[in-house]
Amino acid sequence: MAANDRVAIHEVMEQQTVTLAKAGIHASLNARCSILAAANPVYGSYDSTKRPQENIGLPDSLLSRFDLIFLLLDSMDAKKDQKVADHVIGLHRTSAGAEDGGGDDLADVVKKGEEEMLQEEDAESRLKRFLSYAKSLEPVLHADARNALASGYADLRAKADERTLPVTARCLESLIRLATAHAKLRLDDSVTVDDCNAAFELVSAVLYGEKDKVENKLRGQNKNDEQDDDDDEMLPPEEPEAEVDLRRAVVAVISEAAVDTVDVADLTNAVNEKLADHEVGQAALLAVLTSLENDNVIMLDTSDNTVTRL
């Protein structure tokens, strides 16, 4: 984004005004509305080794003014890609395919489309009336909700690090807005602790969603059949528990390291200190590091024997 564009959007989000200077006419207009923005990564594809701020290409002072920032990564998944392909191909179906059984009759398609359109218009009308009434409400923050917001904000600040989006006082204002919006959706005149918890879940998913997902996967808290199959392939049959302990020890050492890049030799010594009951071999450690690199937890550089935390 160009510098002039950053200045313009900064004014809108900070002062809620838009300044116009055209043909000798100078005006300042109110801009009291919600802002929904989308952007592509500056490198063409998202680089997981860099911070979100560096991938988006916007300064922290501007990003912190958005209540929620979601990263939609184009990860390769066979099932997901198949669904997308089926949907796109389905959009190109025509009545000409009815001759070979590949499409529907044109009259049926038109009739079905008209019925769906009427249903959508009715649902859209009801939704507009609901939102109009919900926006007219002004829920009140009571003492228990205020205490929950304060303690939750302190917890978010404690978890923040250099790899996450900045957690500033604006984040507390975002929590208040989200909790209030959740109360409006319930058509309630007061903000409860449940509304605050819903706001925390949203903000935590934005700030630490991917990080928590990886940690839960390593700790075995997010198990399903597919992950169980992956674990069976990853763990040797003779010592599965020892392999899991080694993996957890490696993740713990890398997470506790003061720097992002550590030497493999230093990592081996630190892991051996954690696992005092047995010594870790170079081959076993390399297998764990390769597995972690495949899970996008670390980046292994075999040329200089270093490990970089993502």
Image (tube, rainbow, N blue to C red):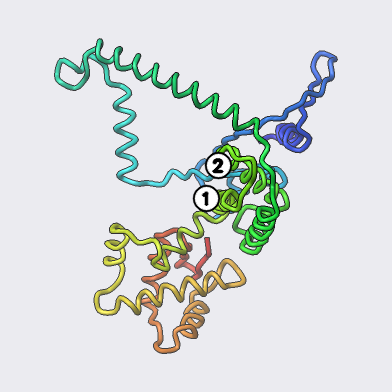
Q: Nearer the viewer, residue 203 or 23?
A: 203
Task: State the separation of the CA atoms marked 1 and 2.
Answer: 8 Å
For disc 1, the neighbor class at 10 Å (few under 14, some 14 to 19, many from 20) is some
Image quadrant in which the N terminus is located: top right
| Position above or below: 280 against 184 | below
* Tag 2 residue: 41
Q: What element carries label 1?
A: loop
Which label is found at residue 131?
Answer: none
Q: Quadrant of the rendered structure where residue 281 is? A: bottom left
- Does residue 183 appear left or right of residue 298 in this picture? right
- The kind of residue tagged 1 is Asp
* Tag 1 residue: 47
On the image, the x and y values in percent for residue 295 come to 41, 60
* Residue that extends furthest to the front in the rendered view of this protein: 189
Dot 1 and dot 2 residues touching (CB under 8 Å): yes
On the image, the x and y values in percent for residue 275 come to 44, 84
- Does residue 134 appear left or right of residue 21 in this picture? left
Query: Residue placed at 63% from the left, 46% from the top?
Result: 191
Q: Quadrant of the rendered structure where residue 218 is? A: bottom left
Query: Residue placed at 30% from the left, 21% from the top?
Result: 92
Query: Residue placed at 41% from the left, 46% from the top?
Result: 75
- The kind of residue tagged 2 is Pro
- Does residue 174 appear left or right of residue 304 in this picture? right
- Does residue 114 appear left or right of residue 159 in this picture? left
